[in-house]
Amino acid sequence: MGSTQFGNFEDFCRDATLPVCNLLSDSHNQTGPWGGCQLRGITLSGGRYLGNLGSILLCAIAIATSIYLIFRSERKRAAVGRREMQLFLLGYIVIEICEIFTVGEFPLSSRVRVAFTGIHIGFIIATTWILMLNAVVGYQIVDDGTPLSLGVIAGTALILLIGTGYIALDTGYHWTGFWDSSYALPNRNIALYVLYQLMPLVFLVAFFILEGILVLRVLGEVRPMAYLTGAAILFALGQIFNYVISRYICNGTMGKIDGALFETLFTLLSVVLIWVFWSSITEDDWPMPVGNTYP
């Protein structure tokens, strides 16, 4: 990608349904100067429409599933990183709630949609950061579940949430006017590009690498890597459907559905596999190093 393209959202918003596009559109929805197939879904009264009913239903399923996994983890009281994993699931729940009103194209006023979008984007980077720190917790540098461990994770995530959320809301509400140029093609916003597009990917790759080292070198096991690899593959499939295949699905269904539905589904399955992976490496019969500290 050339330097002149860095930070541009024009192609992404043309081909995919992304929460950030709500901030870069004059009408604060998925319709903007970038064109492309418009997701309309189900027509409602008064010229309104429910853009992506499938995504909304899957978000509801994801919320219910995450709550179930949180309660399931309560039964693993001796498991390493139990509270930290629950913190990740809580962040994912907030993401899915926001997704109903952003990616799901739920009929809302533009100002309310901007608010949900800012929270959505802020929680994406905060939650992926929490997930990465869940991998660090496994090395027992600090005792898991303690106020120090939870405080560091929640505190640093809050900083990312507030910082990213402010930039997103300032872009959508024009508080300072600093980001107003983002509304013209090629819809360039370097801050949101880095915080929303790049940093979560860095956190996810770091999570995979750290967990892989922990499982293969410390625990000396292979089976849990099947769950972790499966989670990575499912997440990647969701992104491919949303960024690459979405426009073909939208055009082929006359705007009834697009890749966002499949992105929500595959991300949900990925989160479930991450929980299964965590559960599998916190079983009581895994060999644990002496001194409660990993090399």
Image (cartoon, rainbow, N blue to C red):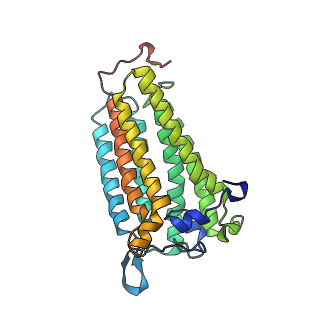
Who's the residue at 45% across and 26% down the image? 214
Q: Is residue 130 depicted above or below 57 in this figure?
A: above
- Asked whether residue 169 appears in the rendered view, the answer is yes
Asked if residue 269 lies left or right of residue 182, the reply is left
Outermost residue on the bottom side: it is 46
In the figure, 215 relative to 13: above or below? above
Instruction: Answer left or right for 207 relative to 60.
Output: right
Where residue 283 appears, as percent x and y from the top left, is 30, 27
Between 253 and 143, the one nearer to me in the picture: 253
Residue sitting nearer the eye, 105 or 215: 215
Where is residue 21? Give x, y as percent. 55, 66
Left or right, 252 with reference to 37 = left
Q: Is residue 158 visible?
A: no
Residue at image coords 29%, 42%: 71
**Which residue is at a point 38% across and 58% down the rendered structure image?**
262
Residue 164 at x, y percent in the picture: 60, 54
Residue 255 position in % (x across, y down): 42, 74
